[in-house]
Amino acid sequence: MIKPPLAAVVWDFDNTLVDTRARNRSVTRRIIEAVTGRAADEYPILAEQHRYDAAIFEWQNWQDLYRIEFELSLDQIRAAGRLWTDYQREDETPTSWFDGIDDVIRELEDWPQAIVSMNTQANIQAALEVAGVASLFTLVIGCDDVGFERQKPNADGLLQCVEALTEADEGTLLYVGDHPVDAQCAANANQELQRRGGQLRVVAVGAAYGTHGPLDGWPIRPDFHAERPADVLSIAGVVRDGRTPLAPAKDR
Ligand SMILES: [Mg+2]
């Protein structure tokens, strides 16, 4: 059977396209101080970068992290969420693109591309402008574009991309991300796509170059691993050639 061809490429942003770890820790420190009234250094995971990175990897999403690690109430978590956009805009901690990932985006210019991220629309757009690749993205969905309850692993943002990037009812979209929540999001999108019928499917690519834990340990394993940014191109090539396995990873 000939498998549906590559229809589009969707990216996560933080630590998939751009290394934002230091800035995100800086912003989180300010948020936690504002919401709790306590010094950020009182929280071990905010005191050192490697601890923050490990905690981010461990939790399915930031709301769980804030609830369990920082012991915030739901109201405090909502307040923290509202501060994220402004504090991100004000923070000047440097971020950097992963080496070669902007070239990969340019190589993929024949395919529609989009971003689904829990960072802010403004941050993402600014980074795309800096790299000169903004025009290659059809759609950018940030944390301000989906409701508080509908962030990843909820598939709403990813499904919006599917609808915006392809009008076909068959084809494969890559979703490239560095975090287990990205593979979970792809799986949730596939459940919904399957329910709708048709042959559109999302293939999850684990961005191993940007992640901070073993890809083998993800509760839902990505279909492919990109050890280097350029690997995304060869994976896209495999999908384009129609050899993409569409069954869930656990069945293969
Ligand atoms: Mg990420």
Image (cartoon, helix red, strand yellow):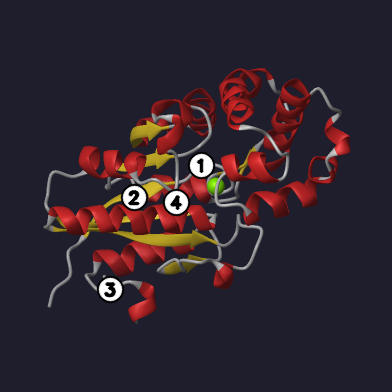
In the rendered image, residue 89, in percent from the top left (x then y), is placed at 61, 19
Q: Is mark 1 within 8 Å of ligand 1?
A: yes
Of the two numbered discs 1 and 4 in the rendering, the one whose residue sits closer to the viewer: 1
Graded by Cα atoms within 10 Å as few (under 14), some (14 to 19) or many (20 or more), the crowding at tag 4 reads: some
Q: Quadrant of residue 217?
A: bottom right
Compute the Cα span from label 3 to label 2.
Answer: 19 Å
The answer, for residue 110, to whether it is visible in the render is: yes
Of the two numbered discs 2 and 4 in the rendering, the one whose residue sits closer to the viewer: 2
Amino acid on which the number 1 mark rests in the picture: Phe
Which is more toward the observer, 73 or 93?
Answer: 73
In the rendered image, residue 139, in percent from the top left (x then y), is placed at 33, 33
Graded by Cα atoms within 10 Å as few (under 14), some (14 to 19) or many (20 or more), the crowding at tag 2 reads: many
Residue labelled with disc 3: 247
Which is more toward the observer, 130 or 209?
Answer: 209
Graded by Cα atoms within 10 Å as few (under 14), some (14 to 19) or many (20 or more), the crowding at tag 1 reads: many
C-beta proximity under 8 Å, tags 1 and 4:
no
Compute the Cα span from label 1 to label 2.
Answer: 13 Å
Give the mark nearer the N terminus: 3 vs 2: 2
C-beta proximity under 8 Å, tags 3 and 4:
no
In the rendered image, residue 122, in percent from the top left (x then y), is placed at 50, 23
Q: What SS does tag 3 mark?
A: loop
Compute the Cα span from label 2 to label 4.
Answer: 11 Å
Amino acid on which the number 2 mark rests in the picture: Val
Amino acid on which the number 3 mark rests in the picture: Ala
Which is more toward the observer, 137 or 172?
Answer: 172
